[in-house]
Image (cartoon, rainbow, N blue to C red):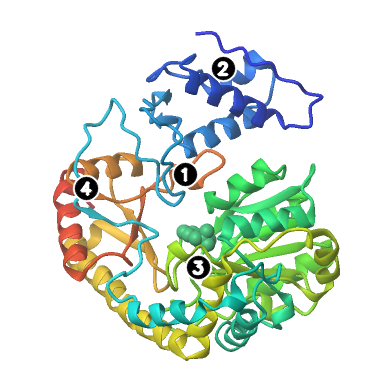
Amino acid sequence: MDICPQLDSQSNEPLYLQLYHYFKEEIQSGGIPSFKRLPSIRELADDLHVSKTTIQTAYQQLLAEGYIESIERSGYFVVEIENEPFGNLPHLSQPPSVKNHFSSEKEILIDFYLSGTDVNHFPFDKWKTCMNQSLDQDFLSYGDKRGEIGLRSALSDYLRQARAVNCTAEQIVMSAGTQTTVRLLCQLIGTDGKKIAMEEPGYQGVRHVFQELGFEVVPIKLEDDGINLEELEKSGAKVVYITPSHQYPLGMVMPITKRIKLLQWAEENGGLIIEDDYDGEFRYHGKPIPSLQGLDAHGNVIYAGTFSKSLMPAIRMSYFVLPTRLLDGYQKKMSVYDQTVSRLHQRSLQLFMESGEWQRHIRRMRKIYAKKHDLLLHTIKSVMGDNVEITGQNAGLHIAMQVNSAKSADELVQIAEEAGVKVYSTTANWISDQEQGTPLILLGFGGLSEKQIIDGIEQLHKVWLPYYLLE
Ligand SMILES: Cc1ncc(COP(=O)(O)O)c(C=O)c1O
């Protein structure tokens, strides 16, 4: 198999993207057949006279999109892409479930899906009432480009009171999901040749957007209390995207001392922080963690939120809060773009909030999720005992768990899948080589019943039992 992409170092398109497009097209057209092993990163870097990072970044993108897979100690292989490769791409928080020749496809009975929410307790009747009321002839035309002012106003009240976000309705822009948020922010900030720092491992959903739109993404290693500030400083990046209140995917909370140092970094370096508070509503033990934005006195934080965890992912509604110093620039540069969220959904949510249902819903869901969270932890402890250690807990809709095993996380995921239980590794969250060590497994609990949680953990323990390392 000849790998001979025409890489153009004079092009505006980064080399890794050229390489990624080359592989993607070759795989789609069958030029590189299914199950074919790709050259190792080192071999290809030597052959093409480019850096290993260029190859690695291209491979990471192909991995994340499910074109190739990494088999430990064997290399990178093209997966079998069936019939309609572009019809139903999986959600980004879910590793692509393409069939491969190393596994027989098993029926999944219990899925610890990271983006699962509790649909049984969704207030359908209340929501339907708001939807019906929103269907008004005054709301059938284009709305405000930043989003309905009534919704932004209700939202700013909520954010100030519940998340200590310092904002007015004027600073809020509604957007259709967090990827749309970061796409709009990329347009606002400008990305050409600029670096953006991200937690490593971090949320791949936004990383794709940053990379595609021209940012050079610099992975910054995590410490027990979040992003390593010395590395951030050394990276030379002026923009950083972080999840300080519940790091995705590892789950740690950035303590106040580090938050203050991060804000100092921004102030001293002309830096900008994008704070993704994707599940800040759900904190089960201890006090809610106030937003980073609320501590910022200099307008260096853009706060981003979403309704995917708190309400439902299907609504595709999120928002961001701009510092006042960026409002004029936003108006000048972005006022040509229409609002991306349905006006009717915005209006429904506004009515839902104004009627007090939103607050009731959040309070109810917090209790329901707390119960599931505690049950999950308790079941893990009593069933798996010292064979595992929970490392990310007390917030959000997923936990992280280290398994005391010589198997890799991907192998444990595979063993579980063979037994009908789906759990997740962090492989897709890494941009550089994943750290070796105790395998880490992610478990979402929002969408599971209590019985499924118990059955799922018991089943996992049963199939992992032969692979635990004895103390
Ligand atoms: C870190 C992070 N941010 C945001 C989201 C939600 O994204 P969206 O608003 O596009 O549904 C998720 C979902 O899993 C996430 O993990």
Determine the CA span between mark 4 and mark 3. 28 Å
Mark 4 residue element: loop
User: Which label's residue is closer to the chain start, 4 or 3?
Assistant: 4
Is residue 83 toward the left or the right of residue 348 in the image? left
Along the line of sight, the residue nearer the viewer: 247 or 174: 174
Is residue 265 toward the left or the right of residue 126 in the image? right
Would you place residue 87 above or below residue 120 in this image?
A: above
Residue topped by disc 3: 246
Along the line of sight, the residue nearer the viewer: 365 or 220: 365
The amino acid type, in three-letter code, at marker 3 is His
Q: Are marks 4 and 3 in contact (CB under 8 Å)?
A: no
Along the line of sight, the residue nearer the viewer: 406 or 326: 326
Determine the CA span between mark 1 and mark 4. 20 Å
Residue 334 position by quadrant = bottom right
Q: Are marks 3 and 1 in contact (CB under 8 Å)?
A: no
Residue at 48% from the left image edge and 23% from the top image edge: 28
Q: Quick check: is the Cβ at mark 4 less than 8 Å away from ligand 1? A: no
Residue topped by disc 4: 108
Would you place residue 151 above or below residue 330 in this image?
A: below
Is residue 189 toward the left or the right of residue 345 in the image? right
> Disc 1 or disc 2, which is closer to the eye?
1
